[in-house]
Image: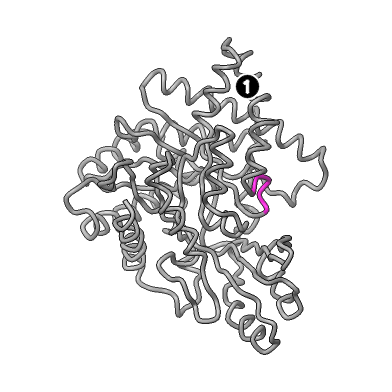
Amino acid sequence: MKLATKNNLHLTYCTNIHPGETWTEVANNLKKYLPQLKTRLAPNQPFGIGLRLADVATQELLKEDNLFQFQTWLQEEDLYVFTLNGFPYGGFHHQVVKDKVYAPDWSKSERLDYSLNLMTILATLLPENLDGGISTLPLSYKPWWQNRDQKNKIFQQSSLNLGKVVAAMAQIYQNTGKLLHLDLEPEPDGILENTAEVIDFFQNWLLPVAGKWLQKELGISQAVAESWIFEHIRVCYDTCHFAVEYEEPQYIIQGLGNAGIKIGKIQLSSAIAIDIPTELAQRKLISEKLSPFAESTYLHQVIARNSDRTLQHYPDLATALPHLLTTGAQEWRTHFHVPIFIRDYQLLESTQEHIAKLLQLLPNNDLSHHLEIETYTWEVLPPEMKLDILTSIEREYQWVLSLLNDQL
């Protein structure tokens, strides 16, 4: 939905919360939930969609006249698509996902082909005079690559594939006037997981490697190649992920901005935060409260912060929990997307404040105008936190809208 703000914000939620990998399953979910949500939240204006499509769904949607039929349905229902979630390539519900969510990574041709299909779909669906973004994984999964030579190969091949994305998006812009961008999404244990690593990748790999390829293949200058890269490769700022990294919004915005890197999409999500008490009895209570979140579907990386501000990483909550009773850390933050409208969970808290701080910065900073609510864990939340899905989505919208109304 387009918000009545001076910076033309568009707010949506990511449909990755609805199980379904085939196009038929996705379409059925959209028809089931979107008209009802529009009636509740934006009955008299167009309602935006943050569309998640697995690879199998993209291939099916591009067959026969499926895309035209979908486009017709969107127009009839007064809905529009302006952002896609291209992070999970395959299954995302009702199965063990864990580190499989990073496969295939950006060194593989399958990831490139999938993303090119997403571009074709978005270029068709995107309304005029609105840019469109596709969020994607932070190149690969860091624990898969243990030495510098392996990582350098991933950076090299990923940069070449991203150069091909830039070329395709530049061609779409020249042919249609529609501006698309691919938004790399840093997260804990991704090869790109924080602001510094994103900047390093752009400066030392993406600009030189993709830039050289673009110059050679398209016969353009270095300056043009770099301008295209900065226009079409951006960052997806997920507030849960950066909060788990203990990075503050102002630092992220300034760091990326100083490096010339744009934010393509802001994903609004919260992580679990825990202040570690000194008393053993309190730690045991927290462990009991935290244990239900150590579920088997997704990775829930934990980053501990010590009194000297150093950080310690655990690959998953189940791996971290045995250390809770003896850790010397002052705080843990866990990559578990909890409802953004809740701050306190008795002994646990959320990083909701990170979202509030970021939204306060929107009026005075030239950031992305794509806002996407992304709480995808409704099915795996502890039972006492589960609500009717429509009510849950509506409450998340209302919480964001209340903050925006106060600040914009």
Predominant secondary structure, magenta span: loop
Q: Residue 223: x, y in percent?
A: 57, 17
Q: Residue at x 44, y 41 (%)?
A: 367
Q: Residue 190: x, y in percent?
A: 66, 49
Verify whether residue 51 appears in magenta. Answer: no
Q: How is the image coloured?
A: one colour
Tell which residue pokes out farthest to the top in this image. Answer: 219
Q: Residue 220: x, y in percent?
A: 56, 12
Which structural element holds mark 1?
A: helix
The image shows a total of numbered marks equal to 1
Residue hosting label 1: 211
Under mark 1, the amino acid is: Gly
Q: 228 or 389: which is nearer to us?
A: 228
On screen, residue 63 above or below 303? above
Tell which residue pokes out farthest to the bottom in this image. Answer: 281
Q: Residues within 10 Å of mark 1 (few under 14, many from 20)?
A: many
On screen, residue 210 above or below 100? above
Q: Residue at x 61, y 58 (%)?
A: 246
Q: 65 or 47: which is nearer to us?
A: 47
Q: Residue at x 57, y 62 (%)?
A: 95
Q: Residue 67: x, y in percent?
A: 34, 36
Q: Residue at x 25, y 46 (%)?
A: 4
Q: What segment is highlighted magenta in the picture? A: 189-193
On screen, residue 376 above or below 235? below
Tell which residue pokes out farthest to the left in this image. Answer: 44
Q: 198 or 47: which is nearer to us?
A: 198
Left of 189 or right of it: where is 176?
left
